[in-house]
Structures are given as structure tokens and as C-alpha cells.
Amino acid sequence: MIKFNVMYPFKPGMRFDHDYYRDKHMPMVAQRLGKACLYYSIDRGLAGGAPGAPTPFAAACSIHCDSVESLQAAMDPHVKEILADIPNYTDAQPVVWISDVVVERS
């Protein structure tokens, strides 16, 4: 199993509409990906690792898929639409990271 992670670095004054992201963007992404999206999670940044430290990320999502190939096959026809929706909820530049899930639940 792999995870397609999208993280939105926090910057003071940035715009991020968590409600839009949760209620519109991510459901649209999951619908476009179809069966390739096994499930997804959304995180809202709260704090950094040290007491009082600001969060390094405003938000993040992880989309769980069987393989990079299934993700790419499902994403390719919709990537322009998905990217075009980003300005509707943020002015941040997302960071993408694909990871191999070594332990899912422990």
C-alpha cells in the first residue's frame, strides 16, 4: 500500500479554507480517483514539536492506494481539474510526497 501525501506549509497570513477542503475538494478528488482511492485522511495543523512552536503545516491529506501505478492511472485524466481547484481553498504551494506504508496500524 502507498500513500499520496499532500502537505500545505504554514506561513503567517496564508489563506486556507479548511471547510472547503474537507467538504468539497477532497470528496471531489476521491470521486475522481474512484476505486484507486481506498480511503483518505485530512489533518489540520495545530502546533510544532516544541511547546509554543507554530505548526509547520496548515493542513495535509493522505490518500491510501494499492500502488503508485493505480494512483497514477486514476489521477492522470483528472489532474488538471484537481489542480485548478486549489485556488478555491488556499494560496499555499502544496508539497507532495508518495510513501510506502510499512506499518498501517499497530
Image: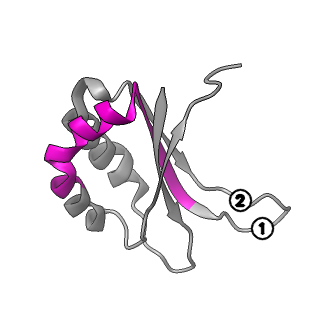
Q: Position of residue 2 (x, y in %)?
A: 47, 32
Residue drawn at point x = 22 percent, y = 28 percent = 34
Asked whether 22 or 104 is in front, the reply is 104
Amino acid under disc 1: Ala
**Residue 53: image tag:** 1
Residue 87 falls left or right of residue 10: left
- Reading the image, the residue beneath label 2 is 47
* Vertical position of residue 42 compared to residue 97: above or below: above
Residue drawn at point x = 29 percent, y = 62 percent = 86
Residue 48 falls left or right of residue 102: right
Q: Secondary structure at mark 1?
A: loop
Q: Residues within 10 Å of mark 1 (few under 14, many from 20)?
A: few
* Quadrant in the rendering for residue 67: top left
Q: Quadrant of the C terminus?
A: top right
Magenta part of the chain = 58-82
Q: Secondary structure at mark 2?
A: loop
* Quadrant in the rendering for residue 10: bottom right
Most prominent secondary structure in the magenta stretch? helix
Amino acid under disc 2: Ala
Residue drawn at point x = 26 percent, y = 64 percent = 88
* Vertical position of residue 63 compared to residue 76: above or below: above
Q: Residues within 10 Å of mark 2 (few under 14, many from 20)?
A: some
Q: Position of residue 38 (x, y in %)?
A: 37, 24
Contact (Cβ within 8 Å) of mark 1 with mark 2 = yes
